[in-house]
Image (cartoon, grey):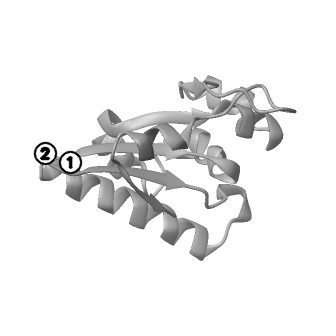
Amino acid sequence: MSKTAIVIFADAKSGSEEALGRLFNALFVAYELQEKKQTVAVIFQGAGVRWASELIKPEHPANTLYKAILPSVVGVCGGCADVFGATEEATEAGAKLIREKAIPGTSGIIDLSKYLDDGYRLLTF
């Protein structure tokens, strides 16, 4: 069985259709792979950490799809949330802040290399 890590970098704050399109496509793939009973890890990294507080809003167009793929959401990069000013909002949204890899100048980030080591393919949006 294949394993896929889906990393969302698109910035919710940009307000662009492109960013929303990237988000939807990431969630679509996660949903499809979940349906096929494949292992999926959805990760919010970089400016993508800003989605955590947006997707929980019932009026957001991706809210229902996000709730459907929640079992596959690993969390939000803690160091990225700090850099992009999204730590408080992500925490209030109930997102899991992950700080598993010490990187100089940060409070710790998600270790994407462990997914590669574990045989995951990475998809980035």
The amino acid at mark 2 is: Lys
The residue depicted at 59 percent of the width and 35 percent of the height is 110
The residue depicted at 63 percent of the width and 24 percent of the height is 91
The residue depicted at 72 percent of the width and 40 percent of the height is 80
Residue 3 place in picture, x, y as percent: 27, 48
- Label 2: state its secondary structure: loop
The amino acid at mark 1 is: Gln
Residue 41 place in picture, x, y as percent: 37, 42
- CB atoms at circles 1 and 2 under 8 Å apart? yes
Indicate the quadrant where residue 81 lies: top right
Residue 121 place in picture, x, y as percent: 37, 56
Mark carried by residue 37 = 2
Which residue of the protein is positioned furthest toward the bottom in this rendering?
A: 18
Residue 72 place in picture, x, y as percent: 33, 38
Q: Which residue is mark 1?
A: 34
Q: How many marks?
A: 2
Dot 1 alpha-carbon crowd within 10 angstroms: few under 14, some 14 to 19, many 20 or more: some
User: On the picture, is 54 further left or further right than 38?
Assistant: right
User: On the picture, is 72 further left or further right than 56?
Assistant: left
Q: Is residue 59 above or below residue 24?
A: above
User: On the picture, is 67 further left or further right than 88?
Assistant: left
Q: Nearer the viewer, residue 64 or 102?
A: 102
Which residue of the protein is positioned furthest toward the front in this rendering?
A: 117
Q: Is residue 106 above or below residue 19?
A: above
